[in-house]
Image (spheres, rainbow, N blue to C red):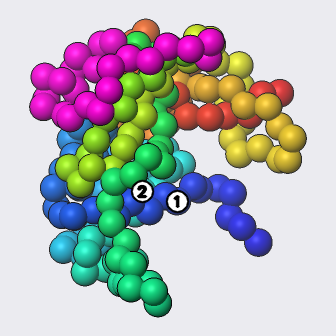
Amino acid sequence: MINLAQVNVRYMVRDVTSSVDFYTTKLGFILLSNMSPAFADVALGDLRLLLSGPNSSAGRAMPDGTVPAPGGWNRIELVVPDIRSEVNRLRKEGVKFRNDFVTGPGGTQILIEDPSGNVIELFQSADFTPTSSKRFPSRGARFRRVPFRLSRCSPEPSSQPDSLGPALWPLHVLG
């Protein structure tokens, strides 16, 4: 049975130490374990991010000789209530951006890169009013975002986004 209590995402990274520093100091992740230079894992709420270096088992060549590498376009999305202030903060900290703001009917997004070139999407929903604190849906559930701290290391949701400063809004289930 699949564990729905936590989401795990693996990113291949060039340097585990610099990646741990990036995710913990720039984005507010909490360090779970560090086995540098091969592997570390960090968490933000129910997201566990596996940072696998070239020396990790995940970095081994495939049978056809292909070697896993960082970069690409697949990404995690961090939902923030005020994307412009979050972008200003990250720019001051020297974070690399892949693009400028892109706005559509659902909201505004911008892409940043970790030290290895993996993409992280910052997203501000056009409608980000919290409606539920239930987590992890059953099939067919509708999703709503609930406020969550981004730049501080606290996994507890809050219904008062204005008091948080920069904040992450993880997906939660409606009704």
The quadrant in which residue 96 appears is top left
Task: Tell how many labels.
Answer: 2
Q: Secondary structure at mark 2?
A: strand
Say if 24 sits above or below 35 in the image: above
Residue 151 in sight from this viewpoint: no
**What's the residue type where badge 2 is placed?**
Leu
Task: Report, in whole angstroms, how far the alpha carbon at label 2 lies from the one at label 1.
Answer: 6 Å
Identify the magenta region.
84-106
Say if 139 sits above or below 141 in the image: below
Q: Residues within 10 Å of mark 1 (few under 14, many from 20)?
A: some
User: Does 169 sit left or right of 165 as displayed?
Assistant: right
Q: Which mark is residue 8?
A: 1
The quadrant in which residue 167 appears is top left
* Camera-side residue of 36 and 11: 11
Q: Which residue is mark 2?
A: 49
Image coordinates for residue 159, horizontal then vertical, percent: 56, 18
User: Does 163 sit left or right of 37 as displayed?
Assistant: right
